[in-house]
Image (cartoon, rainbow, N blue to C red):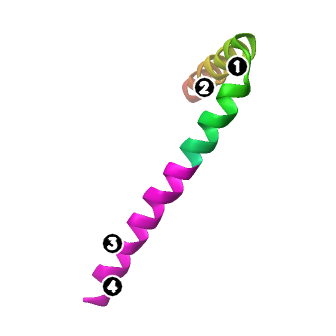
Amino acid sequence: MSDEKNKENKSKADDVHVSDGLGELLEVSEQLTEEEIQKAAEEAKQAVADAKNQKHH
């Protein structure tokens, strides 16, 4: 029974951790210029495309 409670507590802690991470991301993103955001988006798209291409080989 205590295992069940530990799992519940852990998932709550994870939720808080994720929320903190999102808060930090939002703060950082507000400091980025539109140009930097565009560049990061392009790099992310390229990384996804590369990953997809590697799976086919």
Residue 30 is inside the magenta segment = no
Of the numbered discs 2 and 3, the one sitting upstream in the chain is 3
Q: Position of residue 41 (x, y in %)?
A: 64, 17
| Amino acid type of the residue tagged 2 in the rendering | His
Q: Which residue is mark 2?
A: 57
Of the numbered discs 2 and 1, the one sitting upstream in the chain is 1
Q: Which residue is mark 3?
A: 8
Of the numbered discs 1 and 3, the one sitting upstream in the chain is 3
**In the drawing, does residue 24 fall left or right of residue 33?**
left
Callout 3: few (<14), some (14-19), or many (20+) C-alpha neighbours within 10 Å? few
Disc 4 secondary structure class: helix
| Amino acid type of the residue tagged 1 in the rendering | Glu
Q: Nearer the viewer, mark 1 or mark 3?
A: 3
Q: Position of residue 20 (x, y in %)?
A: 56, 51
Disc number for residue 43: 1
Q: Which residue is mark 4?
A: 3
Along the line of sight, which residue is nearer the eye, 53 or 16? 16
* Range of magenta residues: 1-20
Give the quarter of the image for residue 53: top right
Are the residues flagged by discs 1 and 4 in contact, CB closer than 8 Å?
no
The structure residue drawn at horizontal position 66% and vertical position 26%, both measured from the top left corner, is 30
Q: Position of residue 21 (x, y in %)?
A: 58, 48
Disc 2 secondary structure class: loop
Q: Nearer the viewer, mark 3 or mark 4?
A: 3
The structure residue drawn at horizontal position 46% and vertical position 66%, both measured from the top left corner, is 13
The structure residue drawn at horizontal position 68% and vertical position 17%, both measured from the top left corner, is 37
Seen in the picture, residue 49 relative to 54 is either above or below; the reply is: above
